[in-house]
Image (tube, helix red, strand yellow):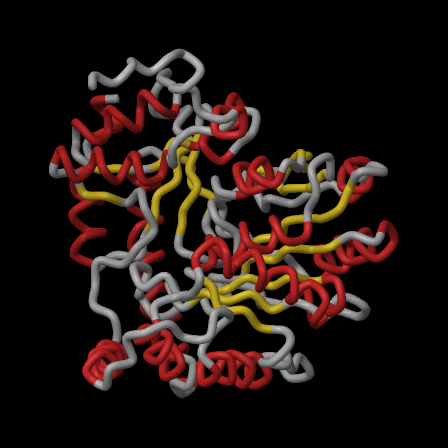
Amino acid sequence: MPQAPATARSARISAKAERFTESVIREMNRLAMARGAVSLAQGFPDFPAPDELKQAAADAIFADVNQYAITWGAKPLRDSIAAKTARTYPGWEPDPETEITVTCGATEGMIAAMLAILDPGDEVIVFEPFYENYGPDAILTGATPRYVALEPPDWSFDPDELRAAVSPRSRAIVLNSPHNPTGKVFTRRELEQIAAVAREFDLIVFTDEIYEHLVYEGEHIPMATLPGMRERTVAVNSVSKTYSVTGWRVGWVIAPPPLTAGIRKVHDFLTVGAAAPLQAAAALALGLPAGYYDSLLAGYRERRDTLVPALEQAGFRVWQPAGAYYVMTDISGLTDLGDVAFAQRLILDPGVAAVPGSSFYAHPDLGRTKLRFAFPKQLATLRAAAERLSGIRTSA
């Protein structure tokens, strides 16, 4: 029997899905791969993960750790998360039984937390520019994002603007430090200003702390360690960036017990659980000695200090990052083209991929003259990109 053709109604996607686009970051990486360009778009390493982690994952697979782990995370991993957190930030000692949920990466951790805590009609304050997932995350919960500007050169915010963004419908603030895309590391004073607003207006703070070990200037201060904030902070993290395993998709959320109960329920029905053998390897990763993190930071500092001057010499205006592994640039001195057109041109000639700045803004015009470059790459990759970019000042 022939099937009836799809109608306009049956082929329609949801109103929520209509409100955001595909990931621009991943689109630019796909274009780079198709054109053979050097990709400094998507933030993943092109160098190997530590051998001991790969061996631990293989050992777990051959030991038949291949079935479901406990939905909210295998106990050895939750114990390792709790121990590393307490070791790294004395005084913050999350309970692995009631405050930790293992997720399929920080991306799932953030959306699971938002779905568990936010209701349709709630408002969420987001600092702009922002990692592109936060807007769709809020939209999928039925919440409305409200934006507070981070202004160059130091990407600071106006505390009065933050307070003005709070309304009777406000439920939460999203904080990412070290920050993607700017590399900003929020200062203690700024964190205390955010915390004061959260306490005064009874708001939750969702914190994305995935770049916690990549701080070149300043220090990473978890929001949960500030007075009165542990009970209202939902901290999202992952092994992806710190251990160079972005494809493993093993993350976690630390939250107060009442919120954890909701997060675990949503996580269960979103994904059931993260890959069991990779959870076993992640538990080993979290026990690596302090020297590992020192070496990690030194390597990324060298990468940053390779790419930043190359971009400056090519004619970009550069805001040097204090943390994470991204460089935000201004292209207005190079071209009259907008960010999207110029990024597409760079992929074709000279063959380097970056991310258009407008993808990090709810108001795209604010990013029209900006591009973001990622540097979690081998020095040879960064030098190849630098060589290709060296001639664009004269050809732009």
Quadrant location of residue 289? Answer: bottom left
Q: Position of residue 191 (x, y in %)?
A: 71, 58
Task: Compare residues 179 and 240 and report the one nearer the observer.
Answer: 240
Quadrant location of residue 157? Answer: top right
Q: On the rendered structure, is 319 left or right of 44?
A: right
Quadrant location of residue 236? Answer: bottom right
Q: On the rendered structure, is 296 left or right of 192?
A: left
Please report the residue visible at 23 percent of the width from the left and 76 percent of the height from the top: 54
Please report the residue visible at 73 percent of the width from the left and 39 percent of the height from the top: 122
Please report the residue visible at 48 percent of the width from the left and 49 percent of the height from the top: 180
Q: Can residue 322 be seen?
A: no
Q: Can residue 27 be seen?
A: yes
Q: Position of residue 31 (x, y in %)?
A: 21, 33
Find the residue positioned furthest to the right: 200
Task: Compare residues 269 and 338 and report the one nearer the observer.
Answer: 269
Q: Position of residue 243 (x, y in %)?
A: 35, 70
Q: Position of residue 255 (x, y in %)?
A: 65, 67
Task: Compare residues 197 and 144 and report the one nearer the observer.
Answer: 144
Q: Quadrant of the C terminus?
A: top left
Q: Quadrant of the N terminus?
A: top left
Q: Is residue 160 above or below residue 320?
A: above
Q: Is residue 368 above or below residue 153?
A: above
Q: On the rendered structure, is 162 left or right of 341?
A: right
